[in-house]
Every structure is written in structure tokens, then in C-alpha cells.
Amino acid sequence: MKYLLSVMVVILLSGCIGNSGVKIICDESFEYPLSNIENTGIKINENIAQSFNCISSVKDQDIIIVSDYNLITLLYPKKASYYIEFARDSIVIAYSKEIDKKWYEMKDAKIGIMNPNTSACGYQSLMVLKLAEIYYGDNSILDNFICKNTKIKDEETINIPETLGVNENVLVETSFSELINDLNKVDFIFIYKSMAKRENLKYIELPPQINLGETEYRNMYRQAVVRLFSNTLISGNPVIYGFSILSTDPEAIKFADFILNTKGKKLLEDSGLIPLNPALTDNIENVPYALRDYLEEDKSQTNLKPV
């Protein structure tokens, strides 16, 4: 009898130890909203990385969340079969010292960006500079801030080598905390608006034609195309967060339901994001049935192609 009770205690304890929450790998920029979600009582076991690294680092996670939903297509068909677009953001220019509103005319400015080979915000920042050339009618902007200071080349597509070869005028970071700390060393940084607001940074709002924040300018954004060193080709798109459920864990579906329902949307708004209403998916037939009422089909074509 004592042996039986001991076995039962071990089994019960094992069950408690194993209940470590929904396993999520997500972009660092979503860490704050994720912590707020966890504060509602949802148990989460998170792994934080940059969006492109999230894709290459997926193992046994239940959910992946990235700040460029198109990246999830790189997991097709073995690890994922759909994405869900649920919230949008935009790129702003944050600064500590006062800068001219005509920032795009500054010469020899020192700037900070996220690493475009690992971070969606990094390559999206390059897209903003390319779109600024079109918007302001000045084809020297990307060269002035990036190309002349790095090994990145603008050759119809923005070609990003594995080794960026930056000089003292460009600081490239692998975490947003380091990027924000760079404000003491640079003239300005490119960062998501939600993060700038949460960190109480001073920032310049960019025109919607170039800030990657408005779906109505999707076709204009597509004029900016980057090629990562991994030979992945990405054309410009609004900054839209996406997720996919990678396992059959019922807790993952509960987490997704929370993000998509009214309470979750309010929490996302409080985190500085703009929830999509409705959320969108590229393949509703592959989405768990319990989530389908929240979604509509995404009619736009994917802008990412691993080649």
C-alpha cells in the first residue's frame, strides 16, 4: 500500500512539474505584450529571439510569434501550414538629441538599426530608407545612411551580406535593449512605434507611405525588396505580427483564442499595438476549428520567397 501511494505521489508531482505552460518562441519586440498576457493567469514558457532567428530556432514549441507574418511561410510544410495576422505596428525614428525634421537630408549622421539578417525590424528599417528615396525623390538616402557605411548594396534589391562590415556611422544590434541604449551614441535609431511609446522615447512619426504601418500602402511598400545572406527574398509589407500553432496542445489553442478575442485585443492595444479586426489567415482550412470564427482569408499574396 505504501509503495502504491509513493508511486501515485511521484506521478502527481511529475504531472505538476511537466505543466510548464504553453511553449512559445517569439520576437523580442513581443516580450512585453507576452508578459502582460501571462499576468492574466495564462501560463507561458517563452523563448525570446529576433524574428528571423525564431524561424531557424524552432524546436518543440507550441506557438511561434514574429513581427513579419510572412516569415512563417519558411516553416511550410513540415512545421507549419498557416499563419494568422493579428496586430500591426510601424517604424519610427527615435532620438535623444534634437534632430531636424528633414532627417533624410542629414549628412554623416550616426544611426542605429537592428541586424537585418536576424531581425525583421532590421530589414524593415532598410526598406523604410528605400521608400524614403521614392517618397522624397532622392535616390541617395539609403546610400548616405547605410550603403556607404556598410557592405550592404542597393542593386534593385537591397543585398545584405552575412558580414555587414559596418563603420563607425552605423551601429547594428542584436537586441532591442542594446539598440535603445545606443541612443546615447547615435543621432537616431529605427524602432517599432509600440516599443518607442512603451520606453517613453522621443520619436519622429514617418509618413504612412514609408513607415510600413498602413495596409492601404501595401503596393508602395512592395517596391522595397531585400535579399538576406541566406538568399531569402523579402518585399516590403506592413509591419504585421503573425503567429502559428505548431503543436496539438489544447493550451496553445486557448492562448491563441485569448489573443484573438476582445480581452486579448484590449491588452494588445494597451501594449501599443493595433489589433487587426478581423484577424487574417492564408489557409483557414488548416486553422483549428475553434479559432476560425475570428478570421478571414488573407487575399494578398505572400511577399517572401526562399530561393
Image (cartoon, helix red, strand yellow):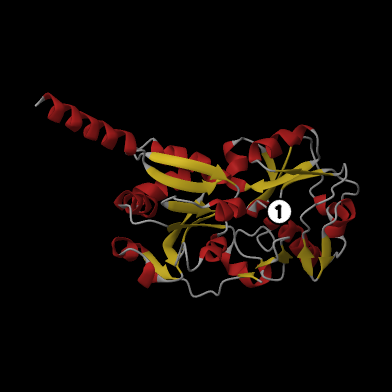
**Where does residue 119 sit, x and y in percent of width and height?**
65, 51
The quadrant holding residue 277 is bottom left
- Between 161 and 90, the residue placed more toward the observer is 161
Residue lying at the far left of the rendered structure: 1
Question: Position of 27 compared to 259: left or right?
Answer: right
Secondary structure beneath label 1: loop
**As drawn, 289 above or below 55:** below
**Where does residue 171 sit, x and y in percent of width and height?**
79, 42
**As drawn, 118 above or below 236:** above
Q: Which of the image's four quarters has the C terminus?
A: bottom right
Residue in the picture at 83% in, 65% down: 154
Q: Which residue is mark 1?
A: 116
Residue in the picture at 15% in, 27% down: 3
- Between 266 and 16, the residue placed more toward the observer is 16
**Where does residue 95 sit, x and y in percent of width and height?**
74, 39
Question: Position of 57 compared to 180: left or right?
Answer: left
Residue in the picture at 47% in, 41% down: 46
**Where does residue 288 sit, x and y in percent of width and height?**
33, 63
Residue in the picture at 84% in, 47% down: 166
The quadrant holding residue 245 is bottom left
The amino acid marked with disc number 1 is Pro
